[in-house]
Amino acid sequence: MSSLTYLIRRKTRPLPLRFREFSSNSQKLINPTSARIEKILIANRGEIACRIIRTAKRLGIRTVAVYSDADESSLHVKSADEAVRIGPPPARLSYLSAPSIIEAASRTGAQAIHPGYGFLSESADFAQLCENEGFTFIGPPASAIRDMGDKSASKRIMGAAGVPLVPGYHGDEQDIDLMKLEADKIGYPVLIKPTHGGGGKGMRIVQSPNDFVDAFIGAQREAAASFGINTILLEKYITKPRHIEVQIFGDKYGNVIHLNERDCSVQRRHQKIIEEAPAPNISNDFRLHLGQAAVSAAKAVSYHSAGTVEFIVDTVSGQFYFMEMNTRLQVEHPVTEMIVGQDLVEWQIRVANGEPLPISQSQVPLSGHAFEARIYAENVPKGFLPATGTLHHYHPVQVSSEVRVETGVEQGDTVSMHYDPMIAKLVVWGEDRTRALIKMKDCLSKFQVGGLPTNIDFLFKLANHEAFENGEVETHFIEMHKDDLFVDPNNQLSSQVVYNAAVHSAAFAAACVCEKEHAVVKESSAGIPSVWYANPPFRVNHYAKRTMELEWEDESSKGGSILVPVHVTYLPKGKYRIETGGSGSSDLELNVVHLRDHDYRVEHGGISTIVSLSVYQKDQMEHIDIWHGSCHHHFKRRKGLDLADVDESDHKYAADVASSHPPGTVVAPMAGLVVKVLVEDGANVVDGQPILVLEAMKMEHVVKATSAGCINGLRVSAGQQVSDGLALFSIKG
């Protein structure tokens, strides 16, 4: 589209966060004698709670955290001045319990409540309750939340204001037959979407009338679980869209400005994973009209505080349409902060105090370019299913004025099935998009998480894709480029490349493990260690040898495991000869030096590489995570099964790890709650037929039959918790 193809070029410089005095504005302050906020309760958890606490501390404001039983030892609890338990792990009994949060604020003497994002942040009833109970709600007025938080109502308001809308149904009537008729009028494909909430929860793309009823009921159920409201709207699904949103901010004096736009097109499961500001490949004229439309939307509902007006852009026609307004601080707000040099949480607090905005629209800067990559605990090969587990190793990148890590976890924490699986947000700034992207790639390659699967490697792949480098983004980006982003198990060439990289990492890992074990023996020995455990260990007439069997999770086979035998020969002066026997592999002679903690220097063929190694125990196995260059691999091995000083020709090993379940068994793809069982044990089913519905982290996943046959051993029921990998049922042919 011609209006989106002009890439703006401008001179930039590093723009650190600046904290301007709001009260310098000459406008008369609202309630100038009222008490200033000195203590804030944060009605949230995780990284956003930590983010708010950090700004509050800088301003000298005391903070109160709230927590469920699952979060008793979390980082946000440790960071706050005070903390109050508000209930058991399920969100509806804790973070969504408005009475519990109000009681916690009363008990601790908090004057204001910051809702963060998610949970109660877009609840007009909660905002009103805060005001009724005498607490300052750090956010927009309840009336604006009600008008704009209800997506159907907001579209009617925008339509009346002349803002283009996507064709759809935004009425109150929710009868399923009526909704199906409306979908027929709109024309397929249609988008089913909850009228409240966000984050992609409850959204469904329906391609044909035959799929509408199941999708509609599922969307209602997921919306009710996530937001407590199950009303739905329908829209025509635009097939080649971009998602561009505008950060707006208003004060209580009627001043509203926009702080430029963000592109949030790269998504999976309707949730953003990489955001950037400003949006690439748009014209100045397009940016101007987009910003003006966003400001008009906010003024129409007398908006104050932070908000985001989201637009869907048809990349074919170049037309933009109003999508929704999020009446809260967005997850991706840091990218805006990086290009305008302002702390938006501070702005929220000061506006809540009755101070005017510190700058006018003409004073809003646009400096450089920023990216945010959301790092999730999730299993990418399994369709980005959320993962749970312990962070046995957590080593984020070094932060600076141009690199931020927004996180709510630390090493040893558990990612729970009860909440969103986001581990951290990596935010980088550069003088232009190219420089910022280079920085993001480097940071992703150095961001280390061990103990559960993450999307870091996938984000690195995505950031290196040529289309992304060129700013050619749209919401179907991942699906469009899946052949480049995912390993095809049927492609022998690409599978072999992946396998060879894993074998190379296994060689490095084995050598580092040997060096680590030698260091442990040396440190623990009282006096001179035995010559049998020296480095190299003494043997008569030959060098000591051992074989490690490392089990590698092959992502190309969606969770299959392959045994990689590594034969290690100890050589003098800290050197090791590594034989892997892999296809096309050759013996490696490695020199290993332990630098510090988890870091080693491995030299091979005159090239020295920094290697990071994490070794930990889990599920009665030893787990090894290794990072070097842009590579990360995860291996397992059974303790005590290494074979020492054997003739490798006598050592037989299996090529693949056998499954612990018999053929035909269908296992839980993730830990979660069974919300619905659709068939009975003994029923005959067809291939692909839905059998049951699991819910984890407020997202639903339908477990389907893997083949036609008879269901056998179906013992789970609605309301039952299941663990990842648990046998749910089997199918007899």
Image (tube, grey):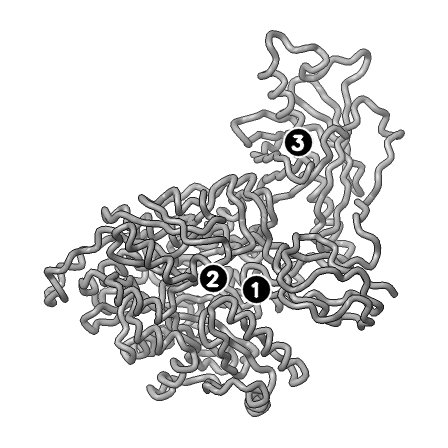
**Residue shown at 40% from the left, 49% from the top:** 85
Residue shown at the point (56%, 54%) measured from the top left:
417
The span from disc 3 to disc 2 (Cα, nearest Å) is: 58 Å
Residue 40 shown left or right of residue 236 in the figure:
left
Mark 3: amino acid? Gly
Q: Quadrant of residue 477?
A: bottom right
The local crowd at label 3, few if under 14, some if 14 to 19, many if 20 or more residues have their Cα within 10 Å, is: few
Q: Which residue is mark 1?
A: 699
For marks 1 and 3, the one nearer the N-term is 3
Q: CA distance from mark 2 to mark 1?
A: 15 Å
Q: Secondary structure at mark 2?
A: helix
Residue 454 position in % (x across, y down): 58, 51
Dot placed on the residue nearer the N-terminal end, 3 or 2: 2
Residue 4 image-quadrant placement: bottom left
Q: Which residue is mark 2?
A: 92
> In this picture, is 557 found above or below 170?
above
Contact? badges 1 and 3 (CB < 8 Å): no
Q: Amino acid at mark 2?
A: Arg
Return the residue at label 3. Answer: 605
Q: Which one is in front in this view, the residue at disc 2 or the one at disc 1?
A: 2
